[in-house]
Amino acid sequence: MRLLRSKSDDRLLFHVMIYAANGGGMESIMDYVKAFVVGGLICVVGQILIDKTKLTPARILVTFVVLGVALELIGVYGRLVDFAGAGATVPLTGFGYNLCKGVRDAVAQNGAMGIMTGGLKAAAGGISAALVFGFLVAVIFKSKAKK
């Protein structure tokens, strides 16, 4: 009995084979798989919080950032980043991790002044991108009031 496969499965298999043939190797493919699984699990937790609790989306977002800071403080999130790469740094918990790591590095370099400057310096790229793209969306699209 042959398992049912779609055309997209065949295309994915084709791209994986081409990637491996061009020197990507199985280690690189596993990096993608690890990032996908870890990032997906973080998103699943967020979706469960949205569906099963009365928390507002803003509170869930803040919870994820604070959770990233807390997990980095106890030394867990850095190991998760080493394991999953972008799967751990792209979600909002990764933003909290980045803030915490930036503050820690800046305090080691500049002393107490690093508390105020480290987080912003470490996350400047992400914050700038959010501002620029938010502005562009506001200019391009017309906002509407909810009815």
Image: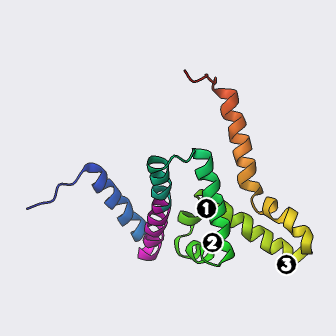
Measured Cα–Cα span from mark 1 to mark 2: 9 Å
Numbered circle sitting on residue 58 = none
Q: Is 80 placed left or right of 20 in the picture?
A: right
Magenta stretch: dominant secondary structure: helix
Could you give the CA–CA distance between mark 3 and mark 2, rounded to whole angstroms? 19 Å
Q: Which residue is mark 1?
A: 93
Which marked residue is nearer to the observer: mark 3 or mark 2?
2
Residue indicated by mark 2: 71
Type of residue at label 2? Leu
At label 1, the amino acid type is Thr
With 12 as the anchor, is 47 left or right in this view? right
Q: Residue at left 77%, top 56%?
A: 124
- Looking at the image, residue 44 lies above or below residue 137: below
Sequence order check, earlier mark of 3 and 2: 2
Identify the residue shown where x is 69% and y is 38%: 134
Q: Secondary structure at mark 1?
A: helix
Tell me the SS state at disc 2: helix
Q: Are marks 1 and 2 in contact (CB under 8 Å)?
A: yes
Q: Which residue is mark 3?
A: 108
The boundaries of the magenta stretch are 25-41
